[in-house]
Image (cartoon, rainbow, N blue to C red):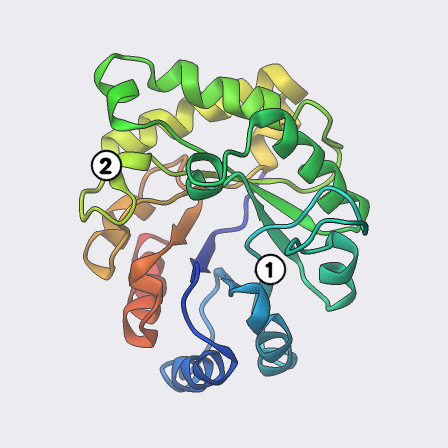
């Protein structure tokens, strides 16, 4: 069963509405024809309307970086999954390492967020990954499989789910897992998906790599059988860099 190859941009807390429009205008101009992969933009919440309008007639998809697990209520500063869906989002990120580490989000909360995302017919992109101390102590596989099992514990496994493996030690540090390290982790996650939901879930679930992906390493990483795309941070803030990752990824096909 073939899986879609996805190159997603996580802008984090960067770019306002005007800058997001300028980025996309330049980004569009860098392609004479659209690549075969699926392109997804995750802008800050304040940019969602601007981005949605810009890509309305383009073969791109977009999503939110985070949402609450309730549709409404006294949750000052949070984003409603119901509203995000009404704006037309395809995806919502769940469990990015910065949400886990900086904002204290735990697996049980993330499981509820996945339910909320699916409730509104969006696709959850669940992020998992280990810290440097966990890798050095040989706990990588244990950490990422536990995050995966707990994150999907309440999910509807019959609908599309996307995973992103992001070793925390390689995010924004300039360090990158070797293609072999990334492939090994992805293979572990793919095997765990079989235990969670069977062969079908495992075969149809894209697993993206996130961790200092650049145009220079995109092609080599893309060749690995269990790497189905990228979740790109810093290198997706410049149109030429992001386009370079997308174009170089295609070299593996």
Front-most of residues 157 and 226:
157
Q: Looking at the image, which is closer to me, 119 or 101?
A: 101
Dot 2: within a 10 Å radius of its alpha carbon, few (fewer than 14), some, or many (20 or more) residues? some
Nearer to the camera, 145 or 113: 113
Numbered disc total:
2
Q: Is residue 36 left or right of residue 181?
A: right
What is the number of the mark on residue 177? 2
Q: Is residue 124 above or below residue 184?
A: below
Residue where numbered disc 1 is placed: 63
Image coords of residue 36 (percent x, y): 48, 64
Write down the quadrant of residue 201 in the picture: top right
* Placement of 230 over or under 150, stated as above or below: below
Q: Residue 180: give x, y in percent of width and height.
A: 24, 31
Q: Earlier in the sequence, mark 2 or mark 1?
A: 1
Please tell me in which quadrant of the rendered image residue 97 appears: top left
Q: CA distance from mark 2 to mark 1?
A: 26 Å
């Amino acid at each position: 069963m073939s899986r879609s190859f996805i190159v997603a941009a996580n802008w984090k807390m960067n770019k306002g509405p005007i800058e997001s429009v300028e980025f996309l205008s330049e980004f569009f101009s860098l392609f004479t024809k659209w690549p075969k992969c699926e392109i997804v933009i995750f802008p800050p919440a304040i940019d969602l309307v601007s981005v949605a309008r810009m890509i309305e007639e383009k073969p791109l998809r977009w999503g939110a970086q985070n949402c609450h697990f309730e549709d409404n209520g006294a949750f000052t500063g949070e984003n409603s999954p119901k509203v995000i869906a009404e704006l037309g989002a395809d995806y919502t990120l769940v469990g990015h390492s910065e949400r886990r580490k900086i904002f204290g989000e735990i697996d049980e909360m993330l499981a509820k967020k996945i339910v909320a995302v699916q409730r509104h017919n969006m696709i959850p992109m669940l992020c998992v990954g280990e810290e440097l101390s966990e890798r050095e102590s040989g706990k990588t596989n244990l950490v990422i499989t536990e995050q995966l099992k707990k994150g999907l514990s309440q999910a509807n496994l019959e609908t599309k789910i996307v995973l992103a493996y992001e070793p925390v030690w390689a995010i924004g540090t300039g360090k990158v897992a070797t293609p072999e390290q990334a492939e090994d982790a992805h293979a572990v996650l793919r095997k765990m998906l079989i235990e969670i939901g069977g062969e079908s879930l495992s075969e149809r679930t894209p697993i993206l790599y996130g961790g200092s992906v650049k145009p220079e390493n995109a092609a080599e990483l893309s060749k690995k059988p269990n790497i189905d795309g990228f979740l790109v941070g810093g290198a997706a803030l410049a149109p030429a860099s992001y386009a370079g990752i997308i174009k170089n990824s295609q070299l593996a096909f």
